[in-house]
Image: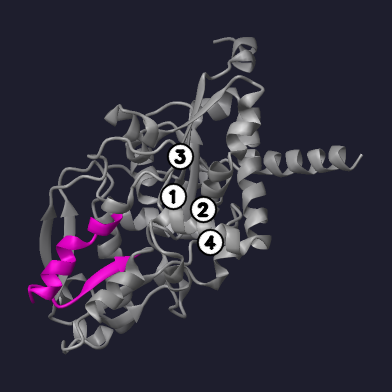
Amino acid sequence: MTEKAIANRKPETLWYTRCPVPTASGIAIQHGWIEEEFAADGIRVASLRASPDRAVRESHFDHSKEDSFRQGGNAPPIWARSEGRDIKVVGLTWLPQYQSILSLKNSKVKTVKDLRGRRIALPRRVNDQMDFWAASAKQGILQALAPEGLGEKDVTWVDLPVHQTYIADPAASSSGALFGARQRAQSASAETFALIRGEVDAIYHYGASGPALEAFLDAHVVLDLNHHPDQEVAINNGTPNVLTVSGALLRERPDLVARYLSQVIRAAHWARTHRQEADIIFAREVSAVEEWLPEAFDATLYENLLPSLSDRLVHALEVRKNFLFKHGYLKKDFSVAEWIDPKPLAAAHELLKSRAVLKAA
C-alpha cells in the first residue's frame, strides 16, 4: 500500500471493547462521544459484544480484529502480543479495585503466615484461550506470600477446572462491556463453592463483585492487597489497566487513533467533576449496585482514570509481563518498551488543546 493510499484509508468500522471495570473508555462510549467523533467521517463505531460472530467477540482476548481498541485487564493483551498479534499499548491506568485473599470466619487461616501448608484454590478455565483468572489468582497469592518469606511450594494448590467460557453467551448489548451480569455473578463460583465445602482453605478474588462475595460468605479478609503498603504487591490483571489499539490502524491512520484517545481523555476529566453521574455509569459497567462501588473501587479511582505512560505504570506492566512469562502463561517473551507507543496519547492531548483554543476563539 502506498503512502498516499495509507493516508486516505478510511476504515468502515472502528471496533471497541473494554472489561467490566471503571474506565474512561466506558464513559466515553456510554455518552456516545466516540460515535459522535467519527460520525462526520462516515465511520461506524461498534462494540465487539454487538457482533453475532463469536470470533469477533473473541478479539477481546486475542486482539484478532483489525481497527479495534481495547481497554481493560492486562493479561489478554500481554498474551496476544506474546502470540505475535499486531497491537500497541497507547495508555495505562492504575485501577484501585477490591483485591483480597479470603477465608471463612471459622477457619484457622487468619494471617498470610497461616497459609503455610494450606489448600489454595486455583480455578482454571480450560476452554478459554487466555486463562486470565487463574493467572490473577496465582499472582495474587504468591505476591501475598512473598513478604512473609513464603513461596509457591509452601502451599497446596487445589486445581478447579471450569468449563464455562467468557465468550459463550450470544451478543446481548450494542454498547455494554463484554461480560454481562450473569458472567460476573458466576465468575468465582468454582472457588466459592470449594471454600464453602471445605475443599480449600483460602481463595483469591478481585473486582467489583468482591465486596458482595465477602459479605455473602461473611468472610475473613486474610489480606487486602489493594491497600498493601508495598504497591507492587497489588500489581495484577487490572493494575495496570491497558489501553491498546491495532498496530496497522496506528501506523496507517494515527490521526484516527489520536481522535479516539481524545474522547477517552475528555471522559476522564468529565468523571472527576461529575462523580455521581459517573458512579451510575460505572455501576452499569460492572454489573453492581452503586452501594458497593466505594468498597469495590476506592476514592482514588477518579484520579486514576486518565491514561498515561508514566514510569510507574510502565514498570508495573513490566512486572506483570515477567510474572506471566515466568509462570508459563506466555510462550514467548518480548520487550514492553518496544510495545508502547507514546505518540498517540501526546497527539490526543494536543488535539484537545487546539479544540479548546478554537472553541474559546
Would you place residue 304 above or below residue 213 in this image? Answer: above
Quarter placement of the C terminus? top right
Closer to the eye: label 3 or 1: 3
Between the residue at mark 3 and the residue at mark 1, the CA separation in whole angstroms equals 15 Å
Residue at disc 4, secondary structure: helix
Choose between 329 and 211: the one closer to the eye: 211
Residue denoted by label 1: 72
Residue denoted by label 4: 279
> Which stretch did the figure color magenta?
184-206
Task: Please report whichever mark, 2 or 3, sits nearer to the chain's N-terminal start.
Answer: 2
Q: Which mark is residue 23?
A: 2
Residue at disc 3, secondary structure: loop
Residue 192 seen by the camera: yes
Q: Is residue 14 magenta?
A: no
Q: Is residue 189 magenta?
A: yes
Task: Please report whichever mark, 1 or 2, sits nearer to the chain's N-terminal start.
Answer: 2
Between the residue at mark 1 and the residue at mark 4, the CA separation in whole angstroms equals 18 Å
Badge 4 crowding class, 10 Å Cα cut-off, few under 14, some 14 to 19, many 20 or more, is some
Between the residue at mark 1 and the residue at mark 2, the CA separation in whole angstroms equals 8 Å
Q: Which mark is residue 175?
A: 3
Closer to the eye: label 2 or 3: 3
Would you place residue 320 above or below residue 106 in this image? Answer: above
Task: Please report whichever mark, 4 or 2, sits nearer to the chain's N-terminal start.
Answer: 2
Closer to the eye: label 1 or 4: 4
